[in-house]
């Protein structure tokens, strides 16, 4: 196996695509310190910030999604797609990768299309139980498709599917950290039950509105909240807490120490993105899932149902969350027996060492194509 292999990794748009991509890159670097890794993302998307912060170079393409509401705008979308394909071909030609890895998101389309048409072997990593459009289009040329859910032969050639699970952020797993230390990190009371509220890397309007609507119930409870609102909802949340001061609520736009937040939490409230679910399974955290309705093919509901059907999570529909979410959470977090049952159930769904298993496949493909 060549020590200085060159790997092109493409995709992004949300943390759900970026965190697995960085985890794969980190595993490659751990095994092959001399490997060269280049990311390709979409201009103005969060990967352009997160990937360099993780220590990797990234090239941005002007690609973005089709506008289903204003069809005339799609002329520009098509122009930018063609421009992105040309740019991707140039990147592939200059970087000369041994393999191209696609994790989903706008940029992976033109990048992996260019790579496969230039004779570069490709590998796809699909995080969700319902395959994204980009990965479905790229599947016929891929040598392997790494998935996290059963039944993915509905979307991909069965002989190329490998069950690996989703790679997660390794900095979440701090075995020396105690719950008491984590709770005190947020300035809260270690003797009280703690609910962690997260809405994904970009925040979640419905979850934030649900908390706001029931802020007095939370204030009057014997429960405390760690509340990540996302940048877009930060000002509104701060104004709410100024009007209704709550000593038992720690609110912030973004939690930099998610290892602390997860360790402190007795119960988590979350969207049902694939990466978040993978983290929760590995951390054995009881969770209430509120799937986002604003995703392709309602795939977050399918993700959530995979857990709720096994007693590993509580599913509350987005449309019902404003009325049901907080009352359900306040009741559930005080029910130690239910929390323990959910923790045991979600632990059985964890796929461990996903990044390592994916890099095993990357190594095999590169070796076979030397």
Image (cartoon, rainbow, N blue to C red):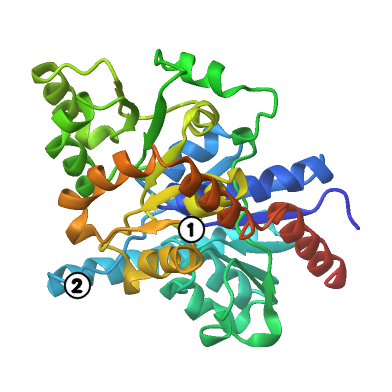
Crowd tier of the residue under label 2, counting other residues whose Cα lies within 10 Å: few below 14, some 14–19, many 20 or above: few
Coordinates of residue 204 in the picture (x, y in percent): 27, 46
Placement of 44 over or under 242, stated as above or below: below
Residue 32 visible (yes or no):
no
Q: Are marks 2 and 1 in contact (CB under 8 Å)?
A: no
> How many numbered discs?
2
* x then y, percent, for residue 253: 30, 29
Res 237 quadrant in image = top left
Q: Which residue is mark 2?
A: 68
What residue is drawn where x is 44% and y is 36%? Answer: 49
Q: Which residue corresponds to mark 1?
A: 274
Residue 318 or residue 203, whichever sits in front: 318
Image coordinates for residue 323, horizontal then vertical, percent:
15, 50
In front here: 355 or 212? Answer: 212
Seen at 32% across and 70% down, the residue is 298
Given residues 289 and 24, the one toward you in this image is 289
Q: Mark 2 or 1 closer to N-term?
A: 2
**What is the CA distance from the residue labelled 2 to the residue labelled 1?**
24 Å
- Disc 2 element: loop
Q: Determine whether, in the image, residue 176 is placed left or right of residue 262.
A: right
Q: Image quadrant of residue 133?
A: bottom left
**Residue positioned 23% across, 58% down in the render:** 318
- Assign a secondary structure to mark 1: helix
């Amino acid at each position: 196996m060549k020590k200085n292999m060159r790997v092109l990794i493409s995709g992004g748009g949300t943390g759900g695509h970026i965190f697995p991509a960085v985890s794969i890159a980190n595993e490659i670097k751990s095994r092959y310190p001399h490997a060269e890794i280049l990311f390709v993302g979409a201009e103005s998307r969060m990967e352009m910030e997160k990937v360099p912060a993780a220590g990797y170079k990234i090239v941005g393409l002007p690609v973005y999604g089709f506008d289903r509401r204003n069809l005339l705008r799609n002329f520009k979308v098509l122009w930018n797609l063609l421009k992105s394909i040309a740019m991707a071909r140039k990147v592939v030609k200059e970087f000369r990768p041994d393999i191209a890895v696609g994790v989903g998101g706008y940029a992976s389309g033109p990048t992996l299309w260019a790579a496969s048409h230039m004779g570069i072997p490709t590998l796809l990593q699909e995080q969700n139980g319902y395959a994204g459009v980009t990965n479905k289009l790229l599947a016929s040329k891929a040598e392997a498709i790494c998935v996290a859910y059963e039944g993915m032969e509905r979307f991909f050639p069965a002989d190329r599917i490998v069950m690996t699970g989703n790679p997660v952020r390794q900095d979440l797993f701090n075995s020396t950290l105690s719950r008491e230390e984590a709770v005190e990190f947020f300035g809260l009371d270690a003797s009280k039950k703690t609910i962690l509220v997260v809405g994904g890397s970009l925040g979640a309007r419905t979850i934030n509105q649900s908390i706001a609507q029931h802020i007095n119930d939370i204030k009057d409870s014997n429960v405390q909240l760690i509340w990540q609102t996302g940048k877009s909802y930060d000002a509104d949340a701060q104004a709410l807490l100024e009007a209704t001061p709550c000593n038992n609520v720690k609110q912030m736009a973004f939690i930099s120490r998610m290892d602390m937040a997860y360790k402190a939490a007795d119960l988590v409230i979350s969207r049902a993105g694939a990466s978040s679910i993978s983290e929760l399974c590995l951390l054995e955290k009881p969770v209430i899932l509120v799937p986002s309705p604003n995703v392709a093919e309602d795939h977050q509901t399918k993700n959530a149902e995979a857990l709720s059907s096994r007693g590993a999570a509580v599913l509350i529909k987005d449309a019902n969350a404003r009325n049901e979410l907080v009352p359900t959470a306040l009741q559930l977090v005080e029910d130690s027996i239910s929390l323990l049952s959910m923790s045991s159930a979600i632990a059985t769904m964890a796929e461990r060492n996903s990044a390592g298993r994916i890099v095993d496949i990357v190594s095999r493909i590169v070796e076979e194509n030397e």
